[in-house]
Image (cartoon, coloured by chain):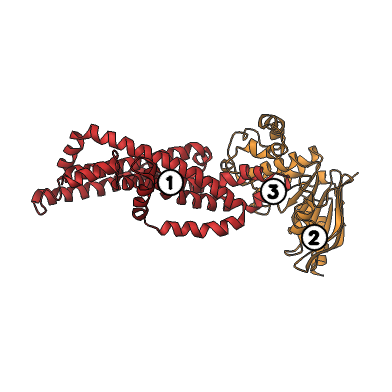
Amino acid sequence: MKKRSESIRDKLLPAGAFCLILLIWWGISAAGWIPEYMLPSPPDVVGAFIRDFPNLMRHAWVSVEEALTGLVIGTLLAFALACAMDRFLNLERAVLPLLVVTQTIPTIAIAPLLVLWMGFGVAPKIALVVITTFFPIAVGLLDGFKSADPDAVALLRSMNATRLQIFRHVKFPAALPYFFSGLKISASYAVVGAVISEWLGGFEGLGVYMTRVRKAYAFDRMFAVIILVVIVSLLLMRLVNLLRALSMPWLRKAPEPKRKGVT
Amino acid sequence: MEVLKAEHISKSFDSKPVLQDVSLRLEEGELVSLLGLSGSGKSTLLNIISGLVPPDRGRVFLGGEEITGRPGHISYMLQKDLLLEHKRVIDNVSLPLVIRGMKKEEARAQADPYFEQFGLSGTQGLYPSQLSGGMRQRAALLRTYLCSHGVALLDEPFSALDMITKGQMHEWYLSVMRRIRLATLLITHDVDEAILLSDRICLLTGTPGEIRHEIRIEVPRGERQGFELTPAFLGYKQRILNMLKE
């Protein structure tokens, strides 16, 4: 029964830490050390969340749609580029350093440019999500392709396998754990990316909502929307974990120490 | 009948000679060991025979047809079983057939009857991670057999196993070989293993590697239960060790 008690402990400890932080927060606001308009108490935030729930959901749906669309496009582009880089070494040499440089450009700095070029619709939001989600997946996949056992590749070559067959049977499955690690990071970036791009203009979405409540000094609703962003990101990461488990059934069968990749 | 023949193989890497005029042949159903110390060019010879690396000089024939530098004719098996973790055992084993263009279902059906013969009954639907080390090697050997064209190259296939499992694998291998006629070139540095399993032993020695000695083991392979504990066995071992030290 050791395993079960371990798993309970693994859940209890973070839950305990979370409750502790919540209590400290509550204590601070109840003691009146910080004025309520600056730091609303937890019940106020929950109240705001419930009162504004339909409104929050409407905005959340818009952001999630942008995030998912961007994530899908980003994943497809990343997959195409990673395959091309794996196939043509010179392409990797030429493009990979550029990719790394683009990652050092702050998202906040490109977002206004995208709005300038693409207007206030969903296009600049999706574009920003694509830009932020593309990199972790492309780099993850590329590393994954390289992680394929060269001896296994040689064995398939000795069977006279084509390049495509080697890719399908050895390289692609080897890259899957890396892909999902990248996808998990990208999924959390996607929501944040959508929200940030909505700050800079738009008609709907959690970022727009955030800007409005900030201007109205409604900090209880500000906190409510922050919590919603966290929840949405966590759900999206959960979804990635589910996809991962479904697409790699062999990992569930493996004895514990042999499990590979990030859970 | 001669199934595999390698003639006058020479190979250098970066003008450093690795193999020098190596010739060997394999009769139908025969097991020949290529015994050599580390760095004697054993693995290079394996790569040349399997067609992955072209030799500088010399030719390789399979059943009379020249296959020098052409992969896809002779399969090999290494110390690492190289089973693909994401495929079930049956799909791992039938992979060579799928690579040749066979439908997945058809390949499975063709591989399935061999599971019992190889002592792998009931493992078809498992993943490799659910098998023990010995069972994984059996599966790898079955995969090798299924794309073998009657000849298999085994490169130190049992050297990663513990002593007991290794002994069991040797016995198992001898018994399987009695049922299937598979000519085998066994590459090894384990003198005991070579004497126990082979019809003939070729000693690959020196740099660049050359075959200077060939020893025939006179005890038939079918009668080698407990052979490793007999004076005859030790006699062979003594001779081989002396030759290796030359």
**What residue is at 28 percent from the left and 41 percent from the top?**
A206
Give the numbered dot on residue A130. 1
**Residue A249 location in percent, x, y?**
51, 37
Near-viewer residue (B111 or A135): A135
**Shade representing chain B:** orange
Is residue B162 among the parts visible in the rendering? no
State which chain disc 3 sits on. A
- Tell me the quarter of the picture where residue B114 sits: top right
**Residue A40 location in percent, x, y?**
15, 46
- Tell me the quarter of the picture where residue B232 sits: bottom right
Say what secondary structure mark 3 lies in.
Answer: helix
At label 2, the amino acid type is Lys
Task: Using the numbered discs, state the Cα–Cα distance from disc 1 to disc 2 in whole angstroms.
Answer: 67 Å
**What residue is at 70 percent from the left and 29 percent from the top?**
B106
At label 3, the amino acid type is Leu
Q: Residues within 10 Å of mark 1 (few under 14, many from 20)?
A: many
Give the numbered dot on residue A155. 3
